[in-house]
Image (cartoon, grey):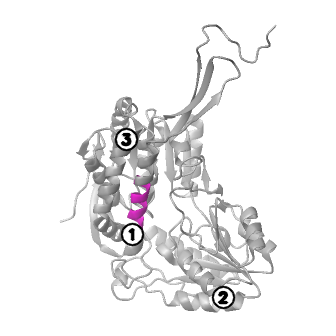
Amino acid sequence: MKNKYLNYINGKWVKARSGKTLDSINPANHDEIIGSVPSSSEEDVDDAARAANEAFKSWRLVPPPRRGEILFRAAELLKKHKESLGEIVCREMGKVLPEALGDVQEAIDMAYYMAGEGRRLSGETVPSELPDKDAKSVRVPVGVFGLITPWNFPIAIPSWKIFPALIAGNTVVFKPSSDTPVCATKFVEVLIEAGIPKGVLNLVHGEGSRVGSAIVKHPDIQAISFTGSSATGIQLETVCGSLHKPISSETGGKNPIIVMEDADLNLAVEGAVWGGFGTTGQRCTAASRVIVHQAVHDRFVKQFKEEASRLRIGDGLKKTTQVGPVINRSQYEKILAYIDIGKKEGAELILGGKPYRKGECARGSFIEPTIFIKVKPEMRIAREEIFGPVVSVLKVKNLEEAIQAANQVDYGLSSAIYTRNVNDSAIAERDLDTGIVYINASTIGAEIQLPFGGTKKTGFGPREAGGRGGALDNYTKWKVIYRDFSGKLQKAQIDKE
């Protein structure tokens, strides 16, 4: 008997109006249905948007420190339920259990951080050019936010969006990925237990082409935050532009690790293995390119191949597993197609490149960790986001050529350089055209107290996480207030006679 889950609209768990459902499948075992959820339509989105719009009238007036108390309780409850939530992430998304628990920990961190922002939400007080007049700016909520999240971080990324939206006084219509709807439901259950009032947070399950599109176009939803593919992001940005509706989108990466001739090779290899094959390469920050100085190229490749070949593939719930499945059949076929493209382009395949079907893995969507060498910057496998366990190694002559190769893609999310030369690291952090730069660390590991996002086709609009320059700039709008207590009309910028 499969578990059945519902939408959450206006404080009640409800079926889709159509009565139709979707099944969530374990990517490590396609015979296991994690649960069924509503296959919603435009009517369900309309119900959620109207509920959120009505709830906004009172939620925006709740003092931010009181909103923060609810988020603090949510953090405590997430800690309490961390093990069970991590197990659901592992079963539904496929990432190995330590990473799944890290997914939940990130939500815990974000809850605490944004709870604290309830006592800040700072603006500015500045002097006026006129006597007996003061001037200030304050943050105010935007209204109803439509939040559309992906499958690869099914607890963390919703927390990046929901917690800052709520602390700022917005209400929410939340549409999670149809690949990880049970994780989203469990997350919302925690927030309900923490005391979120009815209508403030609404959950609508369903396919992106229908539910996501309806959320973006709905007149009662004032702004959008989206994380997902670049193609979908550009499409949504176009729609929002035509509607004059703000959107923040984080949409992908083709992230490089540069390994210089003076690098600690053991450390660099460890970073490349983690960056390339952690989460089975299914991170927007995954290190899908390693750009290696020719002086250490052969040594690096030998060691990189040896370490990657030792990775243990399997169900993420098993303690010995280091690489789990890819999320679904469509992604599985896309990754294998890119591996075939790499071969045809003339890159040399030195590891993996095939489905992994040994033992119990035959029931899931597993692909071997894959490494290509002799990759040229113009090859598709070096330019396009694959979102799987595939790493391209490029050889370069010097730092200038390395940075040029790193920047020669449409994305600019994360980058890294391994070097002991302080001058080279300074040049790299200045010239790498990415939103995040790591020195002697992999491309993975962003912390929630700083903004997260990138350049070029990686994203659009304000960034995720962080305070100023990040999430709070996304989920608030500025209001400037002038108060004149002179008792007479004063004309700014008008010369006195």
Q: Nearer the viewer, mark 1 or mark 3?
A: 3
Residue 493 quadrant: top right
* Front of the two marks 3 and 2: 3
User: Is 413 rendered above or below residue 259?
Assistant: above
Pick whichever, 88 or 109, lies toward us. Answer: 109
Give the residue displayed 66% in from the left and 88% down from the top: 300
**x, y percentage for residue 239?**
56, 41
**Which disc, if any, is residue 300?**
2
Instruction: Determine the CA span between mark 1 and mark 3.
Output: 27 Å
Q: Residue drawn at (56%, 92%), measured in percent from left and top?
A: 306
Please tell me which of labels 1 and 2 falls first in the chain.
Answer: 1
Tag 2 or tag 3, which sits nearer the N-term? Answer: 3
Please identify the residue farthest to the left as the structure is shown: 1
Neighbourhood count class around disc 3 (C-alpha, 10 Å): few under 14, some 14–19, many 20 upward: many
Mark 2: which secondary structure? helix
Quadrant where the N terminus sits is: bottom left
Residue denoted by label 1: 100
Q: Decide which of 107, 397 is in the foreground and name it.
A: 107
Residue 38 appears in the picture as rendered: no
| Up-down relation of residue 222 to residue 413 (above or below) | above
Estimate the spatial distance between the alpha carbons at disc 1 and disc 2, rounded to whole Å.
30 Å
Which residue is disc 3 drawn over? 67
Q: Quadrant of the C terminus?
A: top right
Q: Amino acid at mark 1?
A: Ala
Circle number at residue 265: none
Q: Which residues are magenta?
A: 100-111
Secondary structure under badge 3? helix
Observer-nearest of 252 and 445:
445
Q: Is residue 236 left or right of residue 46?
A: right
